[in-house]
Image: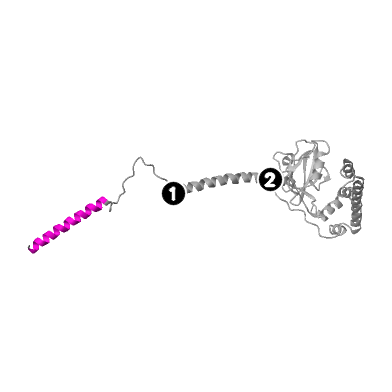
Amino acid sequence: MRWFERIAVSALAAGFGALITLLWLGDAGIGRDVAEPPMRDAAPAAPPRLAQLEDELAAQAELLTQLSADNAELTVRLRDLERVAPGAARTQAGDDPSSSTVADAGAGEQPEPEEPPDLPQAQLLVRSGIEPSLADAIQQRISALEMERLYLRDQATREGWRNSERFSAAMNELLRPQDVLREEFGDDVYDRYLYAMGQGNRVLVASTLQDSPADVAGIRAGDTVLSYAGKRVYSVGDLQSATAAGEPGASVVVELLRDGVRWYATVPRGPLGVRLDVTRRAPSSG
């Protein structure tokens, strides 16, 4: 065979081999750029990551619901605690115009009365501006009143009527030392005594109820109530007793302190409609 015939036979054999190779690759799916479309009747399966996210979202929603329920319960408990917490803001807005109801109102915090220094009572009174001789007399009077209570308690315990109504009635007949102190020594001494003992001696307006007598009279949050109908006010109880006394609806004058300036408001006797706090201030500050 001649050389060019050999070349032709070799080329033909190579071409035939290439054709066989291409046919085999086509049957095997090798080299296809586009995948065959899925069957129309088959439902597409959700990706695993998407299913996991849906489960996590459901768990978070359940947790949020539980947290909301817990928050509501804690809010109720907090309000219950505020009703009995010392120094909590209180409102004077009873329905009965001849009395004043003291209840929780959740106003802002006020400074707690400071603890007095660890000194004898007479020295504390002198530090508050009371004359030494008067301070000794006050201490003796208070000690005598406290001893009366101790003797009564001791007698009731020995005779077996300590837990009876008789004991409660007898104790109520003995005035509290502070009440006697105010009656016998006057408001100024009483004020200095409260301050010296670290007790609250000023009543602050935390807020006013809308369209209440206090609101109409111009009383605002931050005002200090100094007196009501001419009687000095040192506690919420003082103001409560004063508004409940006298003829309901009669015009009375309330003395107040605002930004260091005394001013006066006229209101009808009865509930003022204010939320109150008690704080401790030096008697010289007004």
In percent of width and height, residue 36 lies at: 31, 47
Which residue matches tag 1?
A: 48
For image coordinates 12% across by 59% down, the residue present is: 9
**Residue 98's quadrant in the figure?**
top right
In percent of width and height, residue 10 lies at: 14, 60
State the CA–CA distance, disc 2 to disc 1: 44 Å
From the viewer's perspective, is 40 left or right of 227?
Answer: left
In percent of width and height, residue 107 lies at: 70, 46
- The verdict on residue 18 being magenta is yes
User: Helix, strand or loop at disc 1?
Assistant: helix
Sequence-wise, the earlier of marks 2 and 1 is 1
Name the kind of residue labelled 2 in the image. Arg
- In the displayed orientation, state which residue is furthest to the bottom: 3
Closer to the camera in the image, 130 or 284: 130
- Tell me the chief SS of the magenta region: helix
Relative height, residue 128 to residue 273 (above, below)? below
Q: 10 Å neighbourhood of mark 1: few (<14), some, or many (≥20)?
A: few
From the viewer's perspective, is 112 left or right of 192?
Answer: left
- In the displayed orientation, state which residue is furthest to the front: 1
**Residue 1's quadrant in the figure?**
bottom left
Name the kind of residue labelled 1 in the image. Pro
Which residue matches tag 2?
A: 77
Relative height, residue 33 to residue 250 (above, below)? below
From the viewer's perspective, is 2 left or right of 47?
Answer: left
